[in-house]
Image (tube, rainbow, N blue to C red):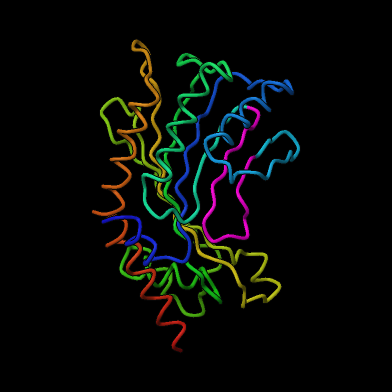
Amino acid sequence: MNSDSFNLLCDDLYLDMYVNTELELPTERDTILSFFERIRKQYPSMGCFYRRDNEYCLEEDRERSQYRWVCLETDRIGSGVVNPSEFEMAYEQDRLILELIPYMLSVSSLDIDSLDVTFVMDFDCTGNHDEVIAEALLSQSAFSCVLDLPGTKPIGVSPTIVVALSNDELTQARISIESKTGVYGQKKKEQIIDEAISLSCTIRQYPETFEKFDPVESFKHQCRIAEELMIEKIIPDIVMPLTETIAQKRLT
């Protein structure tokens, strides 16, 4: 299954990577500009540079359906591609960032708290997101005993689960589905909204205590885990019921 198959199942696909650091990242003007200029040399179309509070960002034009981005926060480096034509399009950019940060931002393996690889799928859904998520994912679960009570109506459904994928618990997966309706919107009777339900799958790797952490090798391993988890579990058991329910709601 390739990125085209993923794109056909959702309205927007995001492939993101985050390097979370123990120490604060450099804030010197020359360091930041040199880092982003090096990235722009590789990807000349990334010409939108801006600062927002303590975050520095370099992006392609967001008006395009597909675009790249890189950001520096206080203690986090982010890199991603929106609607990539293939997974390698995003992976290549992420590997470049991992190769640059040791000597351009002084981020050593000792400084890395964790490394995240994230797949996000957005599903356009007009109406009550909580009802859609509850019907698609909870109607056959133990929670149905609550949902079936007379007069009940789901007004806050954003399920999340974190599981360890290794015996030492240093490799973890976080799967979450986010409703954009919210309890506040329900109180205001704002039932019709024009936003997407978001499903995310993050594979996080913490460094081992007694071994030097190789972020490039870890990234490769995490990408493989993320793809397998998405294809074997999340798409058939979460994405398909969700998209089917959204399609049914559109017909009613």
Is 20 placed above or below 23 here? Answer: below
Is 110 placed above or below 136 here? Answer: above
User: Foreground residue, 136 or 55?
Assistant: 55
Q: Position of residue 55 (x, y in %)?
A: 69, 36
Labels in figure, total? 0
Q: Position of residue 129 (x, y in %)?
A: 52, 69
The residue depicted at 29 percent of the width and 36 percent of the height is: 165
Question: Residue pushed farthest bottom?
Answer: 252
- In which quarter of the view is residue 23 placed? top right
Question: Residue pushed farthest top?
Answer: 210
Q: Position of residue 127 (x, y in %)?
A: 56, 76
The residue depicted at 26 percent of the width and 56 percent of the height is: 1
Is 48 placed above or below 111 here? Answer: below
The residue depicted at 40 percent of the width and 40 percent of the height is: 91
The residue depicted at 53 percent of the width and 16 percent of the height is: 103
Magenta-drawn segment: 58-74
User: Foreground residue, 169 or 31?
Assistant: 31
- In which quarter of the view is residue 76 placed? top right
Q: Position of residue 34 (x, y in %)?
A: 65, 25
Q: Say if the magenta span includes residue 71.
A: yes
- 164 vs 198, left or right, is left
Q: Say if the magenta span includes residue 14.
A: no
User: Foreground residue, 93 or 151?
Assistant: 93
- 99 vs 37, left or right, is left
User: Foreground residue, 77 or 198?
Assistant: 77
Is 211 placed above or below 204 here? Answer: above
